[in-house]
Image (tube, rainbow, N blue to C red):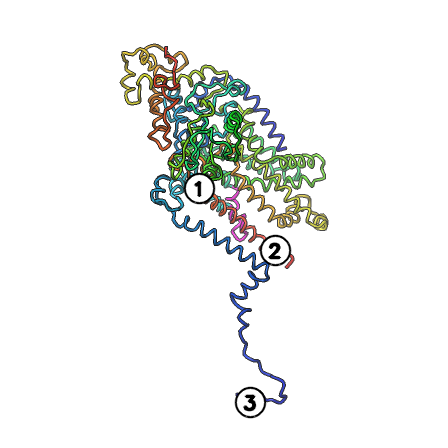
Amino acid sequence: MSDTHSNTVSYVRDSMLPQQEPPLKDRGAVKWLRENLFSGWLNTVLTLLSILTVWFIIIEIGPWLMNTVWNAGSLRECREILDGTSGACFAVIKDRWHQLMFGFYPPEYYWRPVLAFVLMLVAVAPILFAELPRKMLYFSALFPFVGYHLLWGGSIWLPVAVLLGFVAGYIAFRLLDRMSSLISTLGAVAATLAWWFLLAGPFNAAMTSVLPIGLEFVRSDAFGGFLVSVVIGVSGIALSLPLGILLALGRRSEMIFVKSVCVVFIEFIRGVPLITLLFTASLLLNYFLPPGTSFDLILRVIIMVTLFATAYMAEVIRGGLAALPKGQYEAADALGLDYWKAQRLIIMPQALKISIPGIVNTFIGLFKDTTLVVFIGLLDPIGLSNAIRADTNWNGIYWELFIFIGALFFIFCFSMSRYSQYLERKLKTDHR
Amino acid sequence: MKTSVFYGTLAASALLAGAASAQSTLETVQSNGELSCGVSTGLAGFSAPDANGVWQGFDVAVCRAVAAAVLGDPMAVNFVSTTGQTRFSALASGEIDMLARNTTWTFSRDVDLGFTFAGVNYYDGQGFMVNRELGVSSAMELSGATVCIQTGTTTELNLADFFRVNGMDYEPVPIETNAEAQQQYLAGACDVYTKDSSGLAATRASFPEPGNHAILPEIISKEPLGPAVRQGDDQWADIVRWTLNALIAAEELGVTSANIEELAAGTDNPEINRMLGSAGELGAMFGLESDWAVRAISAGGNYGEIFASTIGEQTPIGLARGLNAQWTQGGLLYAPPFR
């Protein structure tokens, strides 16, 4: 191949030289280090400081974590096993994890909250992932009743009676659908309320006496640990989004009455700390309720947490609505869509997409706020950590419980955050 | 609309509450088939759920005794965990039937808040714990010390009073919970930890090296802890008071959970006979069956047995009887006669 270079013009090379590797400082790990960690004296100092910090944390905590005792019946046993050396005593988690998870829920029924949790994932899946068959949404709609019955039990006819209220509303809606959307909506609401207040009670009583089936009733006092956090958190999240959307629309409404009610509600709830609302739920309501017939503390807390999250959600979504150009509203009008259709087909899909980070932020905040119920004596994980510490076996244990609780909360919140990032990427139809 | 429904519910339930309050507490408890008893969310030795979720402890035992006396079943108790903030309104609103939550009997709680204290089940008092390395043997030597103190409690006020009266100064380290205080104290953030002495003993027992820490002899406050009920239902207050008295008197009279079966059949001691119902009609006077005291004492034993099994010297908490011994032993426990 010596004649490849037919050197007709001596200074022109007409064949490619073989590619050479970049110099050492511009490739591989060295390049990455130079660009990301040591790209200037300030970043170098910061990097070194960070490494030192990480090193100290590992030196301090590492041996303690590595030297973990998993099998012991009490803190004293742990200390005997450790025999003066520093080490964690995660035996407390092994001994009490069922309590941290389920509280005082009867152990023979642990399958019920577990099943409810699994079904919740199934119910949530079609909402989160559009690829799944749409038929699964029917199950999602049914899940609140299934979940309630699994967790609390009692007569199966109570959730059925409540469910039939929605069926009654749907039938009324279909019957009146031909007249106008306003009348049919009003009719549906009226039918649902009429069923709940007039017929659901007798129906429930009659069916229970005829056919008393259902799971064993478990009282709310038995709920504790992460069961409480998840029940309150999930109910709050599931309820606050639709209610928040309605409130946000109400606040932007041109009808003065609707608008002022929404504004007053949002500003009032946002102006009050959550802990105040929780104290209201646990203390103030007691004075109004007849003794003995107290309505469930967890239900009261769910209502208050939902109201609180709803107000924040409404403002997040209002931000999304405000970010939409006016042309979108006008385009919807030009297509001849009525208000609800325009919201459903044009406005909301865009506004909600813009609001995703804010919505998930509110969700995560709400989920973590559920630990505030410890102040009204509900035994959530933090409350149970106190109760476990009060047992003479475990009195004096501290970090292990908080590390475990923190890790579980992190799993929940981090997966929510990852999902929201996935959703944002998927819905990113502009700014490509 | 949501808010109006909410307030409508409030108004309606207020009306219902007025109508329902006519029922006496005893009737409520009997018709519910269980006693709603307010306890703390967790205090070592006094109330805490065990690994099976069953509440155990000294305060819990009082609830169980009352449930046994009224309903015949010591397990028929619905324990409502209350915090320092929620305990009084839970009792006042009727959410709980009695409160057994290491609550100090004070004038304002008795008179102003409208409760009736049914007696004293534990005489406590505020004390100090120090590290032995400090070489302090009396609270009078604590001038200039840093003190870990739980905020918002009477102990905070007692501490200020004590140091002012004795002309000493101190630096408070405010702490929210007992668990946090233990960490701070062990980490050396404060020289002294102050708290009710029963709590100090429980805290010290949990330390890796309890022997390195000393509880000083001075007790700077009176903390008579006792079960409380709502004012205005004297029958119910009597039931709780005399159940507690029965536990105390049983110890004095030598009635224990071991020999109560035998003694309930009848003895030579007329007071035991009256208390246990084999003579006289004491139970019927406040609407209970004649063997109410037998059931209460069988639930967890007499006062001494309960003390020994929950907080006594054989337990990790290791409290001596001290003021809580019978009056015949130099203590303050003195049950009025069953007659």
The numbered dot on residue A401 is 1
Question: Which of the pair B284/A54 is nearer the observer?
Answer: A54
Q: Which amino acid does label 1 sit on?
A: Leu
- Magenta highlight: main SS: helix
- Which segment is the magenta one? A124-141
- Say whether disc 1 or disc 3 marks the residue closer to the N-terminus: 3
Residue A402, image x and y in percent? 46, 42
Question: Which of the pair B16/A3 is nearer the observer?
Answer: A3
Residue A134 seen in render: yes
Q: Which residue is drawn at 48% across and 52% down?
A: A56
How far apart marks 3 and 2 lie (CA) works out to 56 Å
Q: What residue type is labelled 3?
A: Asp
Residue A432, image x and y in percent? 63, 59
Q: Which amino acid does label 2 sit on?
A: Lys
Callout 2: 10 Å neighbours few (<14), some, many (20+)?
Answer: few
Q: Is residue A21 above or below residue A220?
A: below
- Say whether disc 3 or disc 2 marks the residue closer to the N-terminus: 3
Q: Name the residue under label 3.
A: A3
Callout 1: 10 Å neighbours few (<14), some, many (20+)?
Answer: many
Q: Mark 2 points at which residue?
A: A428
Q: What element carries label 3?
A: loop
Compared across the picture, whether A196 is left or right of B234 comes to: right
Compared across the picture, whether B214 is left or right of A46 comes to: left
Q: Is mark 1 on a helix, strand or loop?
A: helix
**Front of the two marks 2 and 1:** 1
Using the rendered image, report if marks 2 and 1 lie on a common chain: yes
Asked if residue A129 is among those painted magenta in the image, a careful observer would answer yes
How far apart marks 2 and 1 lie (CA) works out to 41 Å
Q: To which chain does the residue with label 2 belong?
A: A
